[in-house]
Amino acid sequence: MPEAVGISDFPKVCVADFSIQKSDRKFRFFRRLFYGSFRKKMIVLIAAISVVVIGLLVFIIKAAAAPKKVDRVRRLLKQGKNQAAAKVAKQIIAKDQKNYLAHYYLGKAYLADNRGELALIEYKTVNEHALFDAVLQEVPFRREFAAMLVKFDHKEEAMREYLLLTKQEPTNADNFFNAGKLSEQVGRKDLALGFYKKCLMLNPKNAKAHASMGYILFQSKQFTEAKQELNVAISLNPEEYSCYYFLGKILKESKDIAGAVKAFDKAQRDSEYKQKALIERSTCYMIANRIDNAQIDLQRAIELDKDGTKNDTLYARYFLAACYEKNRKIEKAIEQWQIIYSKNHSFRDVASKLSEYKDLQANDSLKDYLTCPDAEFIEICKNLCLKALNLSAQKADSVRDGCSILAVEAKEDDWRNMRKQAQYLRFYRAIEPVEDTAVREVLDKAKAANCTKSYVIASSGFTRTAIAFAENRPVELIEKQRLETLLTTSSS
């Protein structure tokens, strides 16, 4: 049985009970404190976990919804609703700048809406940052991107894209052809030739590759090889009309003028080469001395350029002026030279031509000498012989670019009746300065006619070799300035 507590022990018991109560209160206090803090931490933890879970759910929902939105862009593009597709793509990009599939479709929408520069920006963004996959495929993208770069004349960048494509599609001949074209355009013809050869190894029937090889070989003056490639291209595709232009140039070079004319006739069916072909055909007619035909072609070539600013148009005018000059229509020739000079002061020898003929308006005698018909020209030359050189013409003949006269001194017979000495005169109104070969020919003719002296009179001057050859020989060269003086004397 428990021991009874006496009255004497009561204070001790009370003290002990008080201590127990005090400890109990402390325990309860700390317990409340511990459990209260724990509950708060738990609440905070649960809240944090809830936020993370909700965030993940939102991300998952957005991630699940994003492909559907991008797919909507694709469907709108397929339906031809380009502006609507661009609007949706922009909304996707506004929320996620790194959605490169949306950038790609936005570029396609711009491209379909003829907003190429904006499309190019989007394609460049994709090219710089995107990771290609089964949805955003690299090869189709690079084909489109390369074609766009070519369109906007970014040749170097386009060439890099096609080089990548040749590695990704080593059996695709078109990639090598396009790489060759770009190499040719940037001046790397050696590299271009290699790409064309590779293209033809993969596809021997690529007419454009044969034609392009022909062009390069022509430019490097390998005419035999060039002609072979061009003929192969024509046999594969008779409508490859640009080939006829270069083929005509080769035939013209080899003096086959008739064949060249036929080739240039067919080359006119290519819009890019039509003006060039007309000009080349006109030069063939000029070589064949069919000046009227040449003038018709040159007029047509000039009319093809409405603005009149192309360099080929200046060449057409230059050759047309040569035709007029050949036909003694100097004023019309001057008109063409003046037009050329207004466009390009340094074009060939136009400035010197204008300088050469600047005195025509002031000097009617020189104008008549240069522009009159052949029969009248002979009379002018006879009159010059008599009044300016004191020579009497015995025989006069119309020859190429002028006339020739056999003359004797115009003196009355003296009491000794000495035989008059013959002299040979050759008058030129040619376009180009007289060469030493012409002076040699005059001396030979003078010798054959037993002439003691000869004259060469030219409105266009003489070459240095002609002047040097005439020194210490029985021939006198009369240049333009002196000719003007003689014409003035004979007309007075």
Image (tube, rainbow, N blue to C red):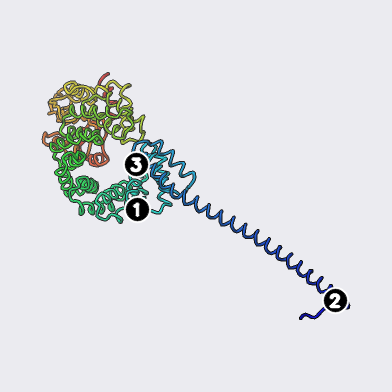
Query: Residue placed at 12% from the left, 34% from the top?
Result: 450
**Which dot marks residue 123?**
none
Q: How far apart, in angstroms, are the residues tagged by discs 2 and 1?
A: 89 Å
| Drawn side of residue 191 relative to residue 5, left or right | left
- Identify whether 208 is placed above or below 191: above
Q: Secondary structure at mark 2?
A: helix
Q: Position of residue 406 (x, y in %)?
A: 14, 28
Query: Residue placed at 16% from the left, 21% from the top?
Result: 375
Q: How many badges with numbers are in the image? A: 3
Q: What kind of residue is marked 1? A: Ala
Residue denoted by label 1: 134
Q: Earlier in the sequence, mark 2 or mark 1?
A: 2
How many C-alpha atoms fall within 10 Å of the one at disc 3: few (<14), some, or many (≥20)?
few
Q: Secondary structure at mark 3?
A: helix
In the picture, the quarter occupied by the C terminus is top left
Residue denoted by label 3: 151
Query: Residue placed at 31% from the left, 29% from the top?
Result: 337
Give the image quarter of residue 115: top left
Using the image as rendered, state which of residue 490 and residue 223 is in the foreground.
223
Q: Position of residue 391 (x, y in %)?
A: 19, 26
Q: Earlier in the sequence, mark 3 or mark 2?
A: 2
Using the image as rendered, state which of residue 68 and residue 70 is in the foreground.
68
Using the image as rendered, state which of residue 469 and residue 327 is in the foreground.
327
Q: Position of residue 134 (x, y in %)?
A: 35, 53
| Drawn side of residue 137 relative to residue 13, left or right | left
Seen as rendered, the residue at the extreme front is: 1
Q: What kind of residue is marked 2? A: Lys
**Which dot marks residue 12?**
2
Query: Residue placed at 13% from the left, 40% from the top?
Result: 256
Q: Nearer the viewer, mark 3 or mark 2?
A: 2
- Residue 423, visible in the rendered structure: no
Q: Secondary structure at mark 1?
A: loop
